[in-house]
Amino acid sequence: MSVIWALIPNWLKYSIAALVAASLLLASGYLAGKRQGHQDAITYQLKQTVKAERERGKDDEKLRGLSDYDLCVVALRRRGLPIDQCDELRGVQTE
């Protein structure tokens, strides 16, 4: 093995070593960037989840004070359905 290694010129050995080192640096930089991008995506998703939970909490606070009729109207309007079906709830009292 040392005989073959001695036949290779020094400039070629140094060039190969430099290429290997550069490849390792580029690969590690790429992997670090990819990991950071993955972490950013997870952080964004968690922020959106928290935001959605806060909005649901606000909706829940608004909906708690509604009568059965009003709650039915809100639900059907969100779905784009006619609110005629809610008329039978007009006189119902909540317990």
Image: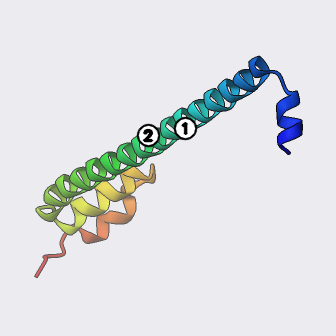
Q: Quadrant of residue 7?
A: top right
Residue type, label 2: Gln
Relative to 6, say whether 73 is above or below: below
In the rendering, which numbered label is found on residue 15?
none
Q: Is residue 17 left or right of residue 95?
A: right
Residue type, label 1: Ser
Could you tell me how far apart the alpha carbons at marks 1 and 2 are, in whole angstroms? 12 Å
Tally of marks: 2
Identify the residue at horizontal 15%, vertical 61% (top origin): 66
Disc 1 secondary structure class = helix
Q: Are marks 1 and 2 in contact (CB under 8 Å)?
A: no
Identify the residue at horizontal 26%, vertical 70% (top origin): 89
Front residue of this view, candidates 78 and 30? 30
For the C terminus, the quadrant is: bottom left
Front residue of this view, candidates 64 and 8? 8
Check disc 1 and report the residue beneath it: 28
What is the residue that sits farthest to the top in this orientation? 11
Front residue of this view, candidates 42 and 13? 13
Q: Quadrant of residue 9?
A: top right
Disc 2 secondary structure class = helix
Identify the residue at horizontal 34%, vertical 51% (top origin): 46
Identify the residue at horizontal 19%, vertical 57% (top origin): 57
For the N terminus, the quadrant is: top right
- Mark nearer the viewer, 1 or 2: 1
Residue 73 picture location, percent across and down = 30, 57
Task: Decide: few, some or many residues near mark 1? Use Cα within 10 Å; few <14, some 14-19, many ≥20.
Answer: few
Check disc 2 and report the residue beneath it: 36
Residue 53 picture location, percent across and down = 26, 56
Relative to 6, say whether 39 is above or below: below
Q: Is residue 4 left or right of residue 83?
A: right
Task: Decide: few, some or many residues near mark 2? Use Cα within 10 Å; few <14, some 14-19, many ≥20.
Answer: few
Q: Is residue 95 left or right of residue 54?
A: left
